[in-house]
Every structure is written in C-alpha cells, then in structure tokens.
Amino acid sequence: MTPSIDPLRQRTTNILPQRCHECSEEALGRCPDCRHSFCQDHFPKQEHSPCAEKQMKIAQFQVCYVCGTQVYPDQWSLAKTSHFVDQFTCKGCGRYVCDELHTQRKAEDIVIVREGLRGHRYQYINRYCDLCAPLYHVGGIKGLAYVIVTVGTIVATIFFYFHH
Ligand SMILES: [Zn+2]
Ligand SMILES: [Zn+2]
Ligand SMILES: [Zn+2]
Ligand SMILES: [Zn+2]
C-alpha cells in the first residue's frame, strides 16, 4: 500500500522558496493581476512587467468617470506580509473614480492568503462613487440589480406555484 500524501501540503512545500519574478530576491507578495510573485520593490504594478506595460497602454482610459481626472491604480507592500491594492475603481459600478472628489466612501477588504509558512495580508481598498455610496450595503448598482433579479425570480416562482 502506498502512503497517502496530502496533496495541498505537498504543493505548499514544492513552491518554497519563492523568488521574485523580476530579480533574485525572496518573493513576498503575489500581484493580484498577473499572479506572479514579487519582492517588496517589484510588487507595485509600475515596477514589473507585464503589468507596467499594460498600465502604460491603458493609462489614457484610466480616468475618473465623473470629472475625467487621470487615476493611477496602485499596489504596494507595507511590510513583508502586508500588501495594499488600490484599483481606483468603484466597487459598485466598476468605473474609475478619482480620490479627491468622487470617492464618496472607502472601505477595505482584507484577504489572508497562506503562502508557504507565511500568512500574507492583502488589503483591498474599495471605493464607492456618489451613486453607489448610498447602495453600499448591497454592493452598489451592480449589487442592487442582483437583488432585484433575485427578488423577481422569487416572485415569479411563487406566481408559478400558485397558478399551476
Ligand atoms: Zn524583485
Ligand atoms: Zn502584475
Ligand atoms: Zn473625479
Ligand atoms: Zn459606482
């Protein structure tokens, strides 16, 4: 009989030690966009390819949907296991919003990701625009549409049930 190996544990062991995708430093965080691992210096999007090139291509479209001010989505590491990600988009409607005038509300999502022996803390900064801020608790305009669809489905189901 072959000894059973926990597949998750085996995978965790195999990926250690992680090296930065850009240099030979120890990797500390994983870019949420390209999924590569980077050291503290290369973690910001502007500091590594292919994200830096991609950022350059779409920079002209990264403008606040209200006032047209250019926004600069960013991510950075505060410490070895603490990373911040700010997409500069409204969590409710997905559009870019500027920081100064049109971010009505900011909230943070904290995601802990285990990588090897460490637990990494990713702090996602969620913004809400003027329109979505009042709908914050249901997840903005997109969330509201979802709630309406769900309620509609329940109503339709009840209707169907009583008429057949
Ligand atoms: Zn590096
Ligand atoms: Zn990246
Ligand atoms: Zn704006
Ligand atoms: Zn919005």
Image (spheres, helix red, strand yellow):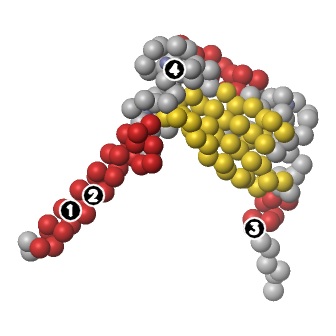
**Residue at point 71% right, 37% down?**
84
Q: Is mark 4 within 8 Å of ligand 3?
A: yes
**Residue at point 49% right, 38% down?**
91
* Residue farthest toward the left in the current orientation of the protein: 163
Q: Which is nearer the eye, 148 or 5? A: 148
- The label shown at residue 155 is 1
Q: Earlier in the sequence, mark 4 or mark 1?
A: 4
The amino acid beneath tag 4 is Leu
Asked whether residue 50 appears in the rendered view, the answer is no
**Residue at point 89% right, 49% down?**
17
Residue 11 image point, x, y percent: 78, 60
Judge left or right: residue 81 versus residue 160: right
Mark 2 crowd level (few <14, some 14–19, many ≥20, 10 Å Cα): few
**Residue at point 79% right, 35% down?**
77
Q: Nearer the viewer, mark 2 or mark 4?
A: 4
Marks 1 and 2, how far apart at CA: 6 Å
The amino acid beneath tag 3 is Pro
Secondary structure under badge 3?
helix
Q: Determine whether 65 is above or below 36 in the image.
A: above
* Residue farthest toward the bottom in the current orientation of the protein: 1
Residue 148 image point, x, y percent: 28, 51
What residue would you read off at disc 3?
7
